[in-house]
Amino acid sequence: MPYGWQPKGKHCGILSQKSATTNVFGLLSKENDFEAYAINASMNAQCLSAFIDDFATRIKQPTVLVLDNAPFHHSDHMKKKYSAMERGRLIYLVSTNL
């Protein structure tokens, strides 16, 4: 690992090792409240859709969801989801420039 904390003038090594993948979908409010969903597998449209559905059950006011340009964000499954979201309290925005 090419970085890490160590005392000044000392060298330490951290061995890397293969481990399970953990993906996190995080939501941050204007008030800096953070909510996260984690999965120990590859993220895909079905996972994202389930996370959004769970989050949507707790929102009380119109909410904007900003996503990056991960390929599955543009899948047919998610396009249908976005259409349904816009009829409720959740509005999406897929960012085009990151």
Image (cartoon, rainbow, N blue to C red):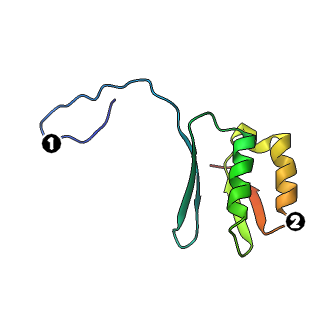
Q: Which of marks 1 and 2 is in front?
A: 2
Task: Please give the name of the residue rendered at 36% of the width and 26% of the height, measured from the top-left corner.
Answer: 16
Residue located at (87% from left, 65% from top): 87
Q: Position of residue 19 (x, y in %)?
A: 45, 27
Q: Is residue 35 left or right of residue 86?
A: left
- Find residue 7 and name its label: 1
Total count of labels: 2
Rendered residue at 34%/29% (across/down): 1
Rendering quarter of residue 27? bottom right
Q: From the viewer's perspective, is residue 74 above or below residue 15?
A: below
| Type of the residue with mark 2 | Arg
Which residue occupies the extreme left position in the image?
A: 9
Residue at point 28%, 29% (across, down): 14
Element type where label 1 sits in the image: loop
Q: Where is residue 31 in the image (x, y as percent from the top left)?
A: 53, 73
Q: Going by the picture, which residue comes out furthest to the bottom? A: 61
Classify residue 9 as left or right of residue 21: left
Local packing at callout 1 (Cα closer than 10 Å; few below 14, some 14-19, many 20+) is few
Q: For the residue carrying disc 2, how many other residues have a C-alpha within 10 Å: few (<14), some (14-19), or many (20+)?
A: few
Depth check: 1 or 41 in front? 41
Q: Say if 21 sits above or below 94 in the image.
A: above
Q: In this view, does 76 lie above or below 54?
A: above
Side of 93 relative to 98 (left or right): right
What secondary structure is marked by label 2? Answer: loop
Where residue 24 appears, x then y in whole percent?
56, 46
Q: Can residue 96 be seen in this view?
A: no
Q: Mark 2 points at which residue?
A: 87
Q: What residue type is labelled 1?
A: Pro
How far apart are labels 1 and 2 at the CA level? Answer: 55 Å
Q: Is residue 94 left or right of residue 36?
A: right
| Labels 1 and 2 touching (C-beta < 8 A) | no
